[in-house]
Amino acid sequence: MHNRRSACLGHDIVRRSRVPNPSMRFGLWSDRSLAVQGPRTNFYTRYMLSIAGLGGLLYGIDIGIISAALLYLNKTINLSVQQTSLIVAAVLGGSMLSSPIAGFIADWIGRRRLMIAGGLLFVASVGIIVVSQSFAGLFLGRLLQGLSGGVIAVAVPLFLAESLSADTRGRGTGFFQLMLTVGIVLAALAGFFYTHQAETAIAAAHGNSVPIIAAENHAWRGMFLAVVYPGLLFFVGSFFLSETPRWLFRQGRHEAALASLRRSVSEGEAQREIHEMQALASSASPDRIEGSATGSLFQRRYVIPFLLACAILGLNQTTGISTLLGFVVVILRQAGMSSSHATPGDVVVKLINIVATLVGVWLIDRKGRRFLLKLGTGLGFNSPSLLLPRQLQIPPLRSFGAPVGMTRRGQLLSGKVATWMEELRAATPRNPVDKPG
């Protein structure tokens, strides 16, 4: 019976995920879409979206907070280049470890409890980082931040998909992605604020090492401590959410599932959805039940598309955008900027990230997913030739190799690729871009 319910509910989620009104796809949430609900369900839907947005914010903070902190970490804690690289990469490593198992844990303990666990991991990670005095403490804290990010990235979209009505589900998941980029900018703003404070104190110290070290120590610890407050809000706020109705239904708790639906939709809609879940569970065929046991992704017709999607995701990460976001301030410093100018540059880069996200949301339903993938890949492929012209006279090996702990072979390969890109750009005829058909 449990397998039967799982198969039905998976179909139910996919079937009901279509947005009935295309003109309302681009608002995060709309008074018109919530007008059919009562004031109580209206408030809960907005509250649920706010907590989900905080989850995206935390994930963005995980990625962006280290950039400005690197200015002062090495000045108060003795770190090698390899240790610095590990501290930056620990967030991505933690996410890679937690993401594959987060889905199984969500099926076991529920989506809401997994969100609470993700918030707790984030708060704990900040506490460990702020009090750390060595590489071990910093690495452990950053690893926990990555674990929390991976958990949140799985739990929150899953929670929204199973809790929101069809006309708000797409905007809810879009809001999560938007708040992720906002979190990256918020981390950059915290870095800018504490860097400005530190540089002012350092200038006023007139070479006295004691206040200088104190200012540098306070700067990077203050950056991390400042972002604990949205983590606390997410952690506490998740306690007041209801478990998703579909997870409750799969556990055989039909009355609890109906009560959960009543918090987010009208009574009529709640009754209709619970009846649909019951009808789908009772009408599941043996073929669908067996298919749910083996998993649809393992069917022959899905294997190649699934592998291609995984390859695209993996290759997208190898472009180095996550590493770039972590080292923006260091790169700008090594390019000749002062700390006071590098951190505003960090903010600008991450504001561009928000703008690109908004453009992507606007384009995806107008031009399609394939067009957006081609556009993003094309921009990423040509960016090295735009950012590293010979006229700049910036040695790429010294500017970019040291922060990420690149090996000598990797540095040589990087230099050859950059040179090849410049030669390719010079040799390629400038043909007009074909207009889409």
Image (cartoon, grey):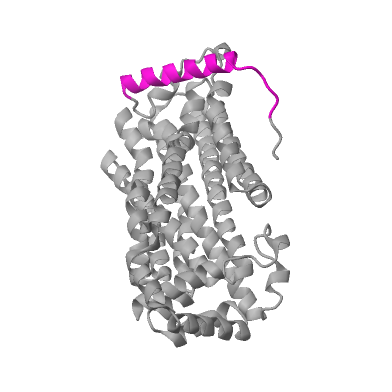
Quadrant for residue 282, please give it.
bottom left
Q: State the residue at coordinates (33%, 48%).
A: 143
In the displayed structure, 392 sits above or below 270; it is above
Q: Is residue 290 left or right of residue 166?
A: left
Residue drawn 36% across the image and 39% down it: 89
Q: Is residue 355 magenta?
A: no
Instruction: Give the residue at x 37% y 69%.
Output: 292
> Residue 410 at x, y = what percent?
35, 23
Q: Which residues are magenta?
A: 407-433
Near-viewer residue (82 or 108): 108
313 shown above or below 298: above
Q: Quadrant of residue 104 in the image?
A: bottom left
Residue 173 in percent (x, y) is at 55, 59
User: Where in the figure is residue 324, as x and y percent of width and height?
Assistant: 47, 34
Regarding residue 77, the answer to whether it shows in the image is no
User: Looking at the rendering, in which quadrant would you find the N terminus?
Assistant: bottom left
Residue drawn at the location 37% of the way across and 54% of the way down: 99
Task: Please name the predominant secondary structure of the magenta segment in the image.
Answer: helix
